[in-house]
Image (spheres, grey):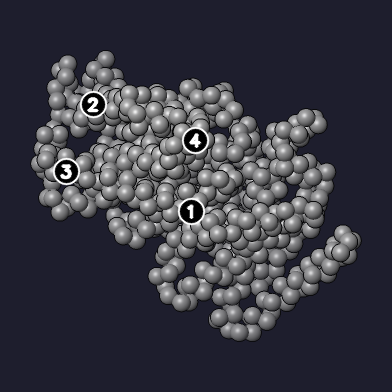
Amino acid sequence: MTENTLSTRNWIVGVIVVIALAVLPFVLSKLGRTGEYWIWVTTEMLINGLFALSLNLILGYGGMVSFGHAAFFGVGAYTVALLMKKAGISMVLALAAAPVAAALAAAVIGWFCVRLIGLYFAILTLAFSQLLYMIVFQWYTFTGGDDGIHGIPRPAFLDPVNYYLLCLVVFVVCFLMMRTIVNSSFGLTIRSIRENMERAKFIGVNVRRFQWYNFIIAGAFAGLAGGLLTELNKFAQTEFLHWSKSAEPILASLVGGMYSLAGPAIGAAVLMFLKIVLQQFHQTLVEIWAIVLGMVLLVVVLFAPDGMIGFFQRMRGKSDA
Amino acid sequence: MVGPCGSVPVGADRGLSLQPILHGQAVMTIQYYVFLLVNGLSLGMLLFIIASGLSLVFGVLRVINFAHGSLYMIGAYVACTLATFLSGGSFFHFLLLLLVVPPVIAILGFVLETTLFRRVYQQEHLLQLLLTYALVLILDDVVRVIWGGDPRSVVRPDILAGSVSVLGMALPSYNVFVLLLGPIIALGLWYLLYRTRAGNVIRAAVHYPDTLGALGVNVSWVMTATFMLGCWLAGLGGVLVAALANVDLGIGMERIIECFAVVVIGGLGSVGGALLGSLIIGVGISFFQLPFGRWALVFPYLVMALVLIIRPWGLFGKPER
């Protein structure tokens, strides 16, 4: 199959999926209370999908393992919460500010982190996210500590269906932006750094700067996802910054395939679906959600690493999906 | 939405009880600084006991064990549970905890190493990181399921519950005990590593595992033994902290990041570096508590960021590992 027909096929599949997703809430809203619940669930799937996609820019395409991506998710979430609740700024402006604030945080944190590779990078991202978590936790007067910030207003015209559609539009726009990014010369440079940092250096690529920009872009998208989730739940809480929140997009990327563009979003949806199935099955199963996530991760690491690498090698030739 | 550790008040006021007991009025003299120094050193020694295990394991296995903090936390909880059976108070019972709990954690380490870690030594870094990360997710949640979210602690033995008088100051004797135990452990480790055949084998495994294997040493058992030793140290730290401060679900993550700071400062794999790093972090936190209160916990992150920028391989480490 040539690259052109593959690309055309991807476009057709993409358009069909988007149309199906756009029709979905109208079907669901006919189903009464269960339908409302599922609209809420699918909205959160879109948001988690965006979060997973943002991490994959650095994890899959950049080859940088970050254990602190929740930091930017949380910064976006708290930006929206604080601006809307305390400053009374409109939702659109607050949502626009979320990625900006997250990008700023990512710029500061990333400036330190990209100086390191591999193991040290992972440690430092984890440490910085814990630092932010602690600040939010301790700074009770500003962030509400572990009470979080509740009662974030929602404009009247945004009923669940409309909010779903808003998230869908944001998701699709972000997806196309990321697609453009990873297929641009910037994206190709990022991938060449992942493949062989030394060679990238030899041909004159400023590795650190590219990784830094990539880190900031990923942070911005994560911040937008955080902002959207805050508005969906009408609250922001410290859990958004917790280290276990950083695990979710990693897992989503692993499950969905981290060397493809749409994979992590699909992985996020699958994981969330799994969570809900467990919930329906037995309430206590959700209380051990972290154990379930850990087990899934263990199984992938122990029994599918060849599958992952094999997948990686297959994707290498056509990773412009 | 809500993270898997929803109900955990991580970072709540569990502050290590390192506030000095002052004689009479506030003595803002040199004595007060001696207090801070003693408390800082004892915290540093506690950190050293845990971090040296982390560092040792990294040195031989080349895997940074994110789950080290979880093992330490399990040690603390096991100590708490055993203490309730022993109806604490006597020094003998406390000694029993010190003798029993660390081997239990070492056995847990044996199981983890032989069933999980051993499978990924040949794999790429990313998979090793994700494996230990999965273990953190699982172990932390298992602890929450078994012991619940309530903080608990071990009653200090009578001998160590009071204070000892040094230079006209009453220093909490338990802190002095930890402060004295640290150097004993450090000496013991030094003796083990540099004066015994087992130590020679371990040090050889750090640098030339292949040659060691060719000489007829079963390297994989050396790795298992080293991992168990690391876990033994984590368990020892757990018992010690259980009588020092409240044990809750956040201590694993909080301590592992302090340990990262310690090993980053000292250099990964260097036990001597771990000693220096622990003392810097311990004393630093203790002194920063005076002007900054709870915000002193930010100190390790600052030092870690600083060291990672100036000398990423640590003070005692070697570049380009």
Instruction: Give the distance between the C-alpha atoms of the residues marked 3 and 4, in whole angstroms.
Output: 41 Å
Image vertical order of residue A277 relative to residue B71, above or below: below
Between discs 3 and 1, the one toward the N terminus = 3
Query: Closer to the camera, B161 or A223?
Result: B161
Instruction: Give the distance between the C-alpha atoms of the residues marked 2 and 1, in whole angstroms.
Output: 36 Å
For mark 4, what is the residue? B214
Measuring 11% from the left and 40% from the top, which residue is drawn there? B92
Q: Which mark is residue B96?
A: 3
* Kind of residue indicated by mark 1: Ala
> Dot 3, how many residues are within 10 Å of its Cα: few (below 14), some (14-19), or many (20+)?
some
Between discs 2 and 1, the one toward the N terminus = 1
Same subunit, labels 2 and 3: the answer reads yes
Q: Is residue B296 shown to the viewer in this render?
A: no
Q: Tell whether label 1 touches label 2 (CB within 8 Å).
A: no
Relative to residue B226, is residue A62 drawn left or right?
right
Between discs 1 and 4, the one toward the N terminus = 1
Relative to residue B13, is residue A262 drawn left or right?
right
For mark 2, what is the residue? B180
For mark 1, what is the residue? B134
Quarter occupied by residue A155: bottom right
